Image (spheres, rainbow, N blue to C red):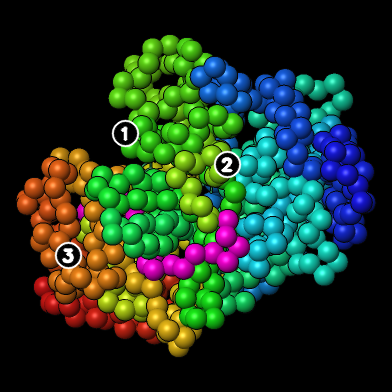
Amino acid sequence: MTSPSLVRASASTAPDFADTAVVEWVQQIAETTRPERVVWCDGSVRERDELLRGLVRTGTLLQVNPDLRPYSFVARSHPEDVARVEDRTFLCTERKADAGPTNNWEEPARMRARLDELFQGSMRGRTLYVVPFSIGPIGSPLARLGVQVTDSPYVVVSMGIMTRMGADALRAIRPDTTWVRAAHTVGCPLEPGQADTPWPCNATKYISHFPESREIWSYGSAYGGNALLAKKSFALRIASVLARDEGWLAEHMLILKLTSPDGKVFHLAAAFPSACGKTNLAMLQPTLPGWSVETIGDDIAWMRVDELGRLRAINPEAGFFGVAPGTSTATNPVAMDTMWGNTIFTNVAMREDGDVWWEGMTTTPPSGLVDWQGTPWTPASGRPAAHPNARFTVAARQCPTIASDWEDPAGVVIDAIVFGGRRASNVPLVVEAKSWEHGVFLGATISSERTAASGGTAGELERDPFAMRAFCGYNMADYFGHWLEIGKTMRARGGVPRMFQVNWFRKDDDGSFLWPGFGENIRALAWMTERIRGVVRARDTALGLMPLDGDVNLDGTGVDAGTWAKLNAIDLDRWRAEADSIERFFATFGGRVPEALYRQLHRLRDALGDP
Ligand code: GTP
Ligand code: SPV
Ligand code: MN
């Protein structure tokens, strides 16, 4: 066996323990893409240091002042490569219906032909990095393996934070292992003598998924979910298909551990659309005395029903790729503490003193800022200093509130599932589902205002079922059916977790948030635990079970009776319009939505009554 120290970033031949199928696949990609060299990554600290220093030399990364934030870096992306590109993200299945109306579909053969063309010579003049990774702790029965090839060293160092990357993952791939092939190129070959740019990418982008052969092909982007293929491409799009076939769930959910003042422990999984509060809830610092929240995951949950019928969840990731703007010592002190050092920032602003800054970090911007594109910035510039989808990439183990069992290969037992979105109107603060079917209906009908994370027009209202619209690797009507089936399996073996819906983003007529949010969200979580324990009653409403006045502790929030009433108001006319919009949404699936969800829609309509 090769000793780990011999498998370095400079290693251009495959380690002797590499599985033949991996070696052959890498050779094949290299023959097509024609890189100058091939490097097999081992995931060592030394390799990471070499890569980071190389990235600083080429100008892709700027080092943050190490006295203020040790071993941290800032990347400035190309101004047109700043978020996931949903209109360039494709699902390639033999039958179009298998992709469903929420995905861009392309015939696998046609997409392959297109990609073959684009990948021809695409890595000329660059290094092809072989990045073996495990999603989930290596050796966990829930973990999965993959290999990404990429010509972006920025992607390599990011994957090194977000996954268990390197020689151990490669060793775990045996001849009988199912592993995912993930090919990535920035699509920017270098001619001999041609100078490189800090953020090479291509105006043409394809983020393509082949769930039937478990492959991902990504062309033209180096940003986040487009390029870190273990994340949304594998851990959600491909994994959701594996989960459907094997009877488990791959979800866009945070996982947190909540302990009540009397020491009772609850685990919650919550699905909110991109940039709608998962990282913040996962790191919540309770304002109610005696409560504590520990973090298990902030973006993705893999969940499986155990022998006792309980839903067990793991965080398949090893790091956080979190939204920077809005993050501050006031809103999310835990995230601020997590990124004390060893952090890669992308598209943030830089201060005169060489540290980072973004909107919301302080109430007034410091003077002498340079914006995310490297241009001097003042508040009069009329544009944000940090890009609205600026991110921090940091290891989960640096999180001061990380739960001691966050890497438990068996996962944690989920007591409640929470759905939410960003809704300025209509949706109350907290509602409990009346049944599993009703909870699936709440999940299936989440609607939310678009954010900067998804690359469309921010603010537009759209349906984002289970916060998975952009991440479900098959027809979402079948996905709803899969959720209903999982409920049946659990009920047959024991019971189902409770389900809730929340909305932290309801606004007053003057446009201000009605709810203080962040640490105060503990008040809604505390009510949920009291419902689970059966110590408080609830109001039966058209939308579900809602808190009785006084049951959600508002002491010290400044939320008065009038504001509380606005937070909980149900406007019947507007909800009749919501019901119509849900019906139109269901109709886009052409009769494939399960009958149980139509029953829920009829119940909602009955409860709302006639105008
Ligand atoms: P992705 O990483 O894109 O999946 O996003 P996420 O769901 O983890 O969202 P995140 O927690 O990063 O929050 C996104 C934005 O919403 C940030 O600007 C937060 O400051 C803001 N936010 C989060 N929680 C709250 C809240 O309770 N109230 C208000 N008003 N804003 C919030
Ligand atoms: C999201 O958009 O939901 C993210 C960021 O978590 S990305 O990894 O780019 O998808
Ligand atoms: Mn996300």
Callout 3 amino acid: Pro
Which numbered circle lies on residue 345?
A: none
| Image position of 163 (left or right of 445) | right
The residue to which callout 2 is attached is 395
The alpha-carbon separation of the residues under discs 2 and 3 comes to 38 Å
Callout 2 amino acid: Ala
Tell me, yes or no, whether the highlighted magenta stretch contains residue 422: yes
Identify the main secondary structure in magenta.
loop
Q: Residue furthest bottom?
A: 492
Q: Is mark 3 within 8 Å of ligand 1?
A: no
Q: Position of residue 285 (x, y in %)?
A: 34, 44
The residue to which callout 3 is attached is 547
Q: Residue at x 34, y 63 (%)?
A: 264
Q: Residue at x 6, y 52 (%)?
A: 561
Q: Which residues are magenta?
A: 407-426
Tell me, yes or no, whether the highlighted magenta stretch contains residue 101: no
Comes first in the chain, label 3 or label 1: 1
The alpha-carbon separation of the residues under discs 2 and 1 comes to 22 Å
Considering only vertical position in the picture, is 563 above or below 311? above
Comes first in the chain, label 2 or label 1: 1
